Image (cartoon, grey):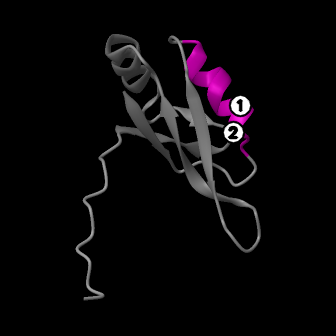
Amino acid sequence: MKLLVRNLARTTTEQEIQELFEAHGTVTECTLVLDKETGKSKGFGFVEMPHAKQAKMAKAHLDESRVGTNRIRVRVAQDKEPQPDTKS
């Protein structure tokens, strides 16, 4: 299950997020979204957990929790809808 983690401090690292979620189960991937120009965090990222039960538990425990000075939000990530090809 892929989770969206929002409202992260710009200084929060992938390692910190991974450790936070690993307290609730197995994490197969943790990715912070970075600004292409500056290389700095945009304040959100994704965590992939293979076991839905663990992911739901992590979501329940971590949503609205404090990481540093920020209160993070954890949601189930929605897959992007494919964009129609407008270059015909």
- Judged by its main secondary structure, the magenta piece is helix
Q: Which numbered disc covers residue 16?
A: 1
Q: Is residue 64 above or below residue 70?
A: above
Give neighbour class at mark 2: few <14, some 14-19, many 20+ (Cα, 10 Å).
few
Per the image, label 2 sits on a secondary structure element best described as loop
* Residue 64 position in % (x across, y down): 44, 36
- Which mark is nearer the camera, 1 or 2? 1
* Residue 11 position in % (x across, y down): 76, 50
Q: In front: 80, or 12?
A: 80
Q: Amino acid at mark 2?
A: Gly
Residue at image location 66% in from the left, 66% down from the top: 35
Q: Amino acid at mark 1?
A: Glu
Residue at image location 51% in from the left, 12% down from the top: 24
What's the distance in space between the residues labelled 1 and 2, CA to CA? 11 Å
Q: Is residue 55 left or right of residue 33?
A: left
Residue at image location 36% in from the left, 22% down from the top: 60
- For residue 35: magenta? no
Q: Which numbered disc covers residue 68?
A: 2
Q: In front: 60, or 66?
A: 60
Q: Which numbered disc covers residue 57?
A: none
Per the image, label 1 sits on a secondary structure element best described as helix
Give neighbour class at mark 1: few <14, some 14-19, many 20+ (Cα, 10 Å).
few
Q: Is residue 54 above or below residue 33?
A: above
To which quarter of the image does residue 82 belong? bottom left
For the record, the magenta segment spans 12-23
* Residue 45 position in % (x across, y down): 55, 46
